[in-house]
Amino acid sequence: MGKNLVGNHIRKLRFNHDEMTQQQLADKVGVTRQTIVALEKGNYSPSLELAFRIANAFNLPLEGVFFYGDNTRQ
Amino acid sequence: MIYQEKKSIVSLISTIIIFGAYCAYMYPQYPDGVQESTETFRFWGSFVLILTLVSIVAHIVNSIAFNIVFRITTGEKEPSFADEMDKIIELRSFRNSFFVFVLGFLLAMGSLVIEQPLQVMFVILIISGFISDVTGSVTKLYHYRKGV
């Protein structure tokens, strides 16, 4: 299974948002903690709906949380 | 290791143990004498029926026991619902498992076409059921570990 090309800054953003736990974020966006773990490890690309819900949870646009391609572009 | 990975491993191990133990228990009871007698058909019929029942009960007991042990050892609650990632993995697991079973089913029917004894057909069907179960658990484990 190749690595997903959709990357994210979820881990960093959680830390910047009062050190929000994975469980707190999961509850906020309506998924299990295991899915947040998979997202942070780059093992799962979320659906568009979930991506928007996560971005809303951090009050950021989609591009503020997710990026496409190599991390070095950021 | 996350909850689903542990659960897949436990499911895989229990499937192998249950199937192995059940086959070891039933093997000596195979009727001697005429290969395609009513007694032989009765044996295979009861083999499949009892195996199905034993597997269902064992999976339920296993699941309850696993959740209790998981909660005690990690202090975490098991996920109360399946989200989009779980559903995708469940679908892929079902697809692979179904594919293996259908392949086994076709092989079993093929064995009849090439005039193999009936017990060959039963053995292929039972083994394909077992392998499809294992395939389902392995697929889940793979996708939870490597991503989807």
Image (cartoon, coloured by chain):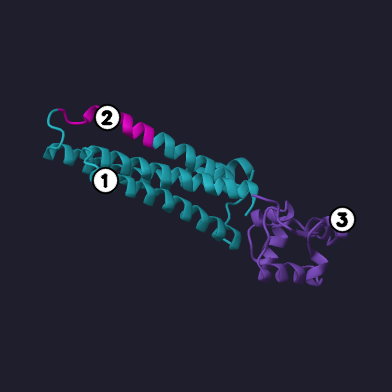
Chain colours: A purple, B cyan
Q: What residue range appears in magenta?
A: B19-32
Question: Against A70, is A51 above or below?
Answer: below
Q: Is residue B108 magenta?
A: no
Identify the residue at image location x=16%, y=33%.
B35
Image x and y of residue B18, in percent: 39, 36
Q: Please name whichever residue, B60 or B8, is drawn nearer the observer in this view of the structure.
A: B8
Q: How would you classify the magenta stretch by its main secondary structure?
A: helix
Q: CA distance from mark 3 to mark 2?
A: 61 Å
Residue that badge 1 annotates: B49
Q: Is residue A11 left or right of residue B129?
A: right
**Disc 3 vs disc 1: Cβ atoms closer than 8 Å?**
no
Q: CA distance from mark 2 to mark 1?
A: 15 Å
Q: Chain letter of disc 1?
A: B
Q: Residues within 10 Å of mark 3 (few under 14, many from 20)?
A: few
Q: Is residue B126 left or right of residue B6?
A: left
Q: Chain letter of disc 3?
A: A
Mark sitting on residue A72: 3
Question: Against B11, is A51 above or below?
Answer: below
Please state which of the two labelled residues, at mark 3 or mark 1, is closer to the viewer: 3
Residue type at mark 1: give it.
Leu
**Disc 3 vs disc 2: Cβ atoms closer than 8 Å?**
no
Image x and y of residue A70, in percent: 81, 56
